[in-house]
Image (spheres, rainbow, N blue to C red):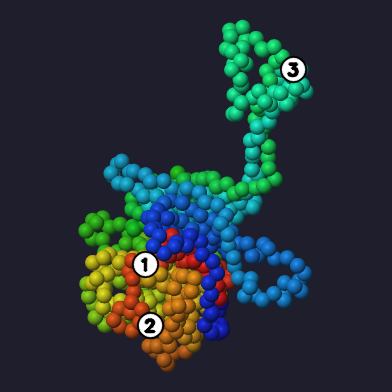
Amino acid sequence: MKGGDEVIASSGPLDWRFSQVFGERSAGEEVHEVDIISAIEFDKSGDHLATGDRGGRVVLFERTDSKNTSGSRRDVEGTDYALRHPEFRYKTEFQSHEPEFDYLKSLEIEEKINKIRWSQTANGALFLLSTNDKTIKFWKVQEKKIKKVCEINADSSRSLGNGSVGSSTSNSNSTNSCLTNGRLPDKVNNYLSNNDYTFPPGGIPSLQLPAVTISPETSPVAKCRRVYTHAHDYHINSISNNSDGETFISADDLRINLWNLDISNQSFNIVDVKPANMEDLTEVITSAEFHPTHCNTLAYSSSKGSIRLIDLRQSALCDSHSKLFEDTETPTSRSFFTEIIASISDIKFAKGGRYILSRDYMSLKLWDINMDSGPVSTFQVHEHLRPKLCDLYENDSIFDKFECCLSGDGLRVATGSYSNLFRVFGVSPGSTETTTLEASKNPMRRQVTTPARPSRPSLSSITRVVRRGAESPGGADGNGNSFDHTTKLLHLAWHPTENSIACAAANSLYMYYA
């Protein structure tokens, strides 16, 4: 699947290697709540990476390996590609959100960054959107020359203008008679304190004059350009930029609003699922995403496991959907947890826009927007946890919201799990790639490849349903490792053009390449 539209053959499982780690904690080091990463996003070029944390900060990283390529073309071509994997460095950070308090609702609004989305660059500046539960902000990050304030001692024998006082006193003597921080000796202060404002004999020994100089060095400076607020009664779970470069959407549990980037005091409500009587509420919006190329199309998921595709050209308020995607396959046994684990926590469009990847608690599902009869592929992620659903409900882990991502070529998908593990699946026809990696410097420590188990072996096209990655029962993964629900890998992102993944394990950012 190339660009989400064309089916091509896969080249086999990737050999994943550790690349970098930022904020690695030592053994036994306590992790502060405000330092835990809550959002990750690559920009469209892949040269910049942004992370947000629960303390309301946004940290930017920039790619360095592509900028340091030097030498002749023959030397560059002769360099092993594996040695030139993406490398990033810290660029800057800024405080995006502060804790607030809604006095009308007596509700505390925490500063945690829920989502980050990059906007189009302009004039060498970077633009991005960040949001917490209630407020969205539009940031501009630009390199600016550093201004330095230098203190200089004026040479009184030369400086007779601009208010300077001439003196026959040498500069060396004047320097000795001047104290720190520009304070003058007591005998000079005595003259200045008199009412006649006369100068001491020989003039003031020395003046420390501040001078502002512009350094050739530059430093990134973040500036908030817009603040979009007072448009959501419920917590914002998604923001998504439109391909037109002018608008974006924000979604909460019951509504989706359409914004213009240049207008912060007005938005248009395009989806509203709030019933007249809240007792009739059966599902909520969990995620929303614009189509990558069609500015009139967007998709949103629900807590019932369905995905709706809507067309903004149909009406101003898109109460009705143009397509509905839901898994029609009835679970073998329904239980109290059936609807909870069916809730979709994240959706992503493939690069070309033909496929949608969704993540629920138990699995990843790949959907073809031209086929609404069911998912084309299903990848089991947490099947081994089914016997433990009651325990997971008791400790609220069953409500964890795992994100998902697709590779730029559309051949693979990835998502996180517990014990700081993440899983990579091949989606091309005939692929049996199922790789489990750990967010550590040795990612292959828990690597396991499980053969595919197609439920419909007679179908060979991309539209067949494939269920892959089922683990052994008993609460252990395919390698027999027991899971730790306290360490979870919720957030990860795939580089848009290369096989490189960035993932967050608590306050640490790990990067891998293949």
Question: In the displayed structure, would residue 457 be above or below residue 384?
Answer: below
Identify which residue, 188 or 125, lies in the foreground: 188
Q: Which is more N-terminal, label 1 or label 2?
A: 2
Label 1 – label 3 distance at C-alpha? 72 Å
- Disc 2 secondary structure class: loop
**What residue type is disc 3 on?**
Ser
**What residue type is disc 1 on?**
Thr
**What residue type is disc 2 on?**
Gly
- Disc 1 secondary structure class: loop
Q: Which is more N-terminal, label 3 or label 1?
A: 3
Image quadrant in which you'd find residue 70: bottom right
- Disc 3 secondary structure class: loop
Q: Which residue is mark 3?
A: 167
Q: Which residue: 39% across, 62% down? A: 28
Q: Position of residue 108 (x, y in %)?
A: 32, 47
Q: Position of residue 244 (x, y in %)?
A: 55, 58
Q: Residues within 10 Å of mark 1 (few under 14, many from 20)?
A: some
Q: Residues within 10 Å of mark 2 (few under 14, many from 20)?
A: some
Q: Which residue is mark 2?
A: 478
Residue sticking out furthest to the top: 196
Q: Which residue is mark 1?
A: 487
